[in-house]
Amino acid sequence: MNKHKTIVALLDKISLSVNLDLVEIVDYWQADLCAIGIRKKNKLVYVSNYNYLNEKQIKFDYDLELIEETGSNKGIVIKEGRNVTDDELITDLKKFLAI
């Protein structure tokens, strides 16, 4: 996976408290090195830190989405998080994905 080092570091931190075998790491945004998805069944957590790469402390934006099972893979955003720490992101990710 070719992603920005801050995204790789986030995935490493997530793996310390979440069994990544229970989820699927998806990369629907291959051209965006600062975006990644974490999916479990019809739930997707979209994560980006592009807006914060020049900050002293890296923050994240995320969307919690329910994926329509109609084959379109369209998501319905049920919660947005903006300008959050990695700890805040991980807490919401674990609750949303029930992991």
Image (tube, rainbow, N blue to C red):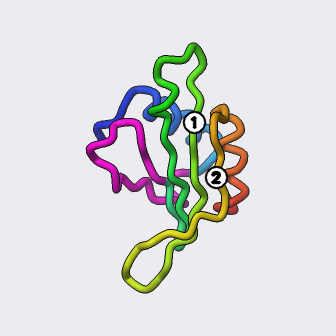
Above or below 79: residue 56: above
| Quadrant location, the C terminus | bottom right
- Which numbered marker is on residue 80? 2
Residue drawn at x 28%, y 47% as measured from the top left:
30
| Above or below for 7 versus 68 | above
Queried whether the magenta region covers residue 63, the answer comes back as no
Q: CA distance from mark 1 to mark 2?
A: 11 Å
Q: Amino acid under label 1?
A: Phe
Query: Viewed as shown, does residue 6 lie left or right of 59?
Result: left
Q: Secondary structure at mark 1?
A: strand
- Place residue 76 in its image quadrant: bottom right
What number is the disc on residue 44? none
Q: Which residue is mark 1?
A: 60
Quarter of the image with the N terminus in it: top left
Indicate the amino acid at tag 2: Glu
- Earlier-in-chain disc, 1 versus 2: 1
Badge 2 element? strand
Viewer-side residue, 7 vs 48: 48
Q: Residue 20 location in percent, x, y? A: 52, 51
In the image, which residues are magenta? 20-37
Mark 2 closeness class: few <14, some 14–19, many ≥20 residues within 10 Å: few
Q: Nearer the viewer, residue 10 or 55?
A: 55
